[in-house]
Amino acid sequence: MWLGLAYCTGPVDAHGYRKTAVQSAQAALNAVRTGALAADAQLLDPYASTLLGDQLGAVAAAQEQLLAEPPPDSGTRNVRDQLLPLLNGSAVQLGDLAYAMSTGDLAAVRAHQEQLRRLGDQLDDFVERYR
Amino acid sequence: MKKFLAFTLGILTAIGGFVDIGDLVASSLSGARFGLALAWVLVLGVIGICAYAEMAGRVVAITKRPVFDLVRERLGPRVALVNLVASYLVTLLTLAAELGGVALAIELVTSVSYLLWVPVVGFVLWVALWRVKFETLERIFGLLGLVLVVFVVALFRLPGHGPDLWHQALSPVPTPGENWNTYWYFAVSLFASALTPYEVFFFSSGGVEENWGPRQLPEMRVNVFIGFPLGGGLALALMAVSAEVFHPLDAQVTSLGQVALPAALALGRLGLAVAILGFFAATFGAAMETGLSAAYVVAQFFGWPWGKRLQPRRAARFHTVLLVSVLLGIVALMTTIDPIQLTEYMLVFSAVVLPLTYLPILVVANDRGYLGDHVNGRLANAVGVIFLVVIVAAAAAAIPLMIVTGAGG
């Protein structure tokens, strides 16, 4: 059992790293899709701030999860380099959407919604490719 | 006319009281990931809870004793002790999840962290359970829970994918990108959400609190066979709106806020406000039921005076267990565990202990010494045995599936 635990807590291999990357991408995908949907609905202000705050937290956790382990080879380094900009973009767009919704700036809301949809499609492609 | 009103009120209470945090979470998560491909599990679960709740209700109406009391007498203190420990721990976990659900619902309308609301909710719950009459509590929150019908309205207001939903419901297989292990993991969780053990403890003990006798059998059966399936319909509506909004986007549901979003998309701010009120009523009502159930099982095992019909002074140990259970639920949440994840784990552990709850009911419902001519007939036994096989299979598969899938991955 001790050996099993030692194996589980050791450095991840390429397969394990890809799995973590897909989980992070899926978490960000859930968040950006939810953000884009929220931009379409008429929401109560406290609800909107809580909902988008939860989604931002989910993206931050996904970033932390991805960066917690070093990629074990050049292939997985490439995977990380593809995903990180998407995660960063998701966090930025969700934060900006929350601000635009709180100030009632409809043009900015639509612009961020469009960005979130585009990021969602890219994250969806990523998940499909590496799943 | 008075009797008709009593029947109607009972049915409405049963419908509104059916949904709890387990149903909210399991139905929405499954709908987002599998569309309606797991709808059959919900239907199966509702048939199961109807069959066993009717048995438990019949036992109470004839013997005027709660099921757990008879379990100890019929199966002996050692078997009953195993049952007690497992049932209490799972009910405690459920209580914590329900308290978390109430706090999350309040967070959605205040944007103040749910963790700050947890102690407040625990205190209000304890005061309500101390001061308010059993029937009043049951009626208020059962009827308020009816507002979850907003998700049925939302289903018809959302841009139509009706044929897609039908296709998903008639194709009970994993959707593209999902595998069989995850499919069965969610199936077990959904099944457990319909048959959560506390429902039987509360139902049977509530029957004693309300002084059921043989004359109440028809009313009990109407509540079970009409109220529960219609309540299951609310859970199905939650699954369907989630399937319609999130599933086509490959987005999963991970927060209570997302569960309410389809109501906002379909019905705007009013729909959203009603949905959140429904969450509050469903989870607060279930928190009361689980708090009472935790105290019921302990008090009934040890033979202490119990129940809301007695003055707290005369049922001091019952009320002490109730208070300690609420405090433990608060402590569990203050560890900052995510209430939604807690609910997912609670459903898995509920599935594991299901046989300990439902086998004794089947045994007692077949005992002529207790029920005389009211023992199970062939149909009740056939349905009961078939479901027991399903329950044992779900219990055996729950933990391995949780490990293999990483709790649904």
Image (cartoon, coloured by chain):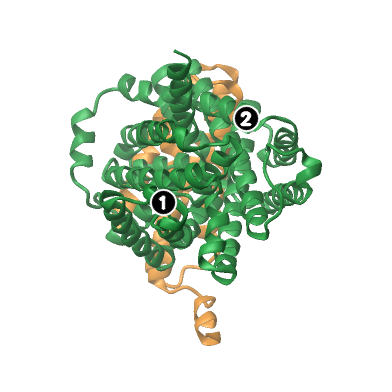
- Residue A95 or residue B79, whichever sits in front: B79
Mark 2 → mark 1, Cα distance in angstroms: 33 Å
Along the horizontal axis of the image, is B242 left or right of B172? right
Residue at figure coordinates x 60%, y 57% from the top left:
B88
Name the residue tied to disc 1.
Answer: B372
Residue at figure coordinates x 73%, y 34% from the top left:
B124
* Chain that appears green: B
Q: Is residue B146 above or below residue B196?
A: above
Q: Which class describes the residues within 10 Å of circle 2: few (<14), some (14-19), or many (20+)?
A: some
Residue B137's label in the rendered image is 2
Amino acid type assigned to the residue bearing label 1 in the image: Gly
- Residue B299 or residue B144, whichever sits in front: B299
Point out the residue furthest to the top here: B1
Along the horizontal axis of the image, is A78 left or right of B80? left
Q: Position of residue B236 (x, y in %)?
A: 35, 36
Residue B223's label in the rendered image is none
How many numbered marks have been drawn onto this rendered protein structure? 2
- Secondary-structure class at tag 2: helix
Q: Position of residue B223 (x, y in %)?
A: 42, 32
Q: Position of residue A17 (x, y in %)?
A: 43, 66
- Residue B165 or residue A31, whichever sits in front: B165
* Earlier residue among tags 2 and 1: 2
* Chain that appears orange: A
